[in-house]
Amino acid sequence: VFGAFWTFPIILYGSFVLRRKMAIFASLGLWAGATISTFAQGGVSSAARVSISLLLTIVMINIVITVLARAQDQLTFQSITDPLTGAYNRRHMEVMLERAACQSERSGTPHALLSIDIDHFKDVNDFHGHAIGDDTLRRLTALVRARVRSVDLWFRMGGEEFLLLAPDTRIGEALGLAETLRREVMASPWPNGHEVTVSIGVAEFANGESWEAWLQRADLALYRAKHGGRNVVVG
């Protein structure tokens, strides 16, 4: 009977070192074994007390683990997203671009970048206020996410500049997507009725280059779009 008490620390330890499903199965197995052993040695009364206390212990441990997991997920989400727009931040962008470059090198899967900048965004802040400017950034994020695939990743580079990573996408497809987004932005209603347009630079990953060089090519394409009249797509 006293040996059954060792089940409690074993369940606690196993719940934090084993995978979740494995820990639950192991805990239930220990609970059943301890209940049967206690019944054989101490009768129904002892078995019932051990069984109920072990079940409560298992339930409480799993509640704590669930709360900790949710808190960890929330902290992770906050660490990789821009608080204003909900887009992924630059730190997460670097991780995902490096991963995409490595995948493309290994498997030959094409990846494209769309570097997107809001034209004359300073005028929006100056003439309509920063609250309207912030709302414009959030609405652009919502517009783009509503029109791209779930596998496409949307990042805020800083200020009014964004980046879209489109996996399994050739340069021609990326240019078509960029043109669609440009037209959607121009045709959409915006706060205070002001006009919003975007310039977009597009670059497909080239084997042998680093993700930094890939990003720089997309930025150079955006630079040409900004200096070529704005509200255009350059690849």
Image (cartoon, grey):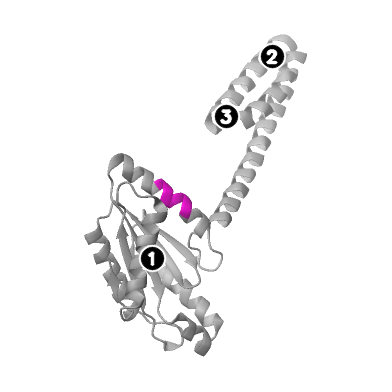
Q: Nearer the viewer, residue 99 or 22?
A: 99
Q: CA distance from mark 1 to mark 3?
A: 50 Å
**Can you say whether 111 is above or below 115 in the image?**
above
Tell me which label, 3 or 2, sits earlier in the chain.
Answer: 3
Contact, CB < 8 Å: mark 1 with mark 2? Answer: no
Q: CA distance from mark 3 to mark 2?
A: 22 Å
SS at circle 1? helix
Q: Label 1, on which residue?
A: 219
**Looking at this rendering, what residue extends furthest in the left direction?**
172
Q: Label 2, on which residue?
A: 39
Q: Is residue 65 left or right of residue 217?
A: right
Q: Identify the mark at residue 116; answer none if there is no mark.
A: none
Q: Nearer the viewer, residue 50 or 90?
A: 90
Q: Confirm whether residue 1 shows in the render.
A: no
Question: x, y (%) of residue 184?
Answer: 31, 75
Look at 39% across and 64% down and name the residue there. 145
Q: Nearer the viewer, mark 3 or mark 2?
A: 3
Q: Nearer the viewer, mark 1 or mark 2?
A: 1
Question: x, y (%) of residue 16?
Answer: 63, 32
Magenta-colored span: 94-99
Q: CA distance from mark 1 to mark 2?
A: 72 Å
SS at circle 2? helix
**Can you say whether 136 is above or below 40 in the image?**
below
Taking the magenta stretch, the answer to whether it contains residue 55 is: no
Q: Label 3, on which residue?
A: 24
Q: Is residue 196 left or right of residue 84?
A: left
Look at 52% across and 55% down and name the residue there. 91
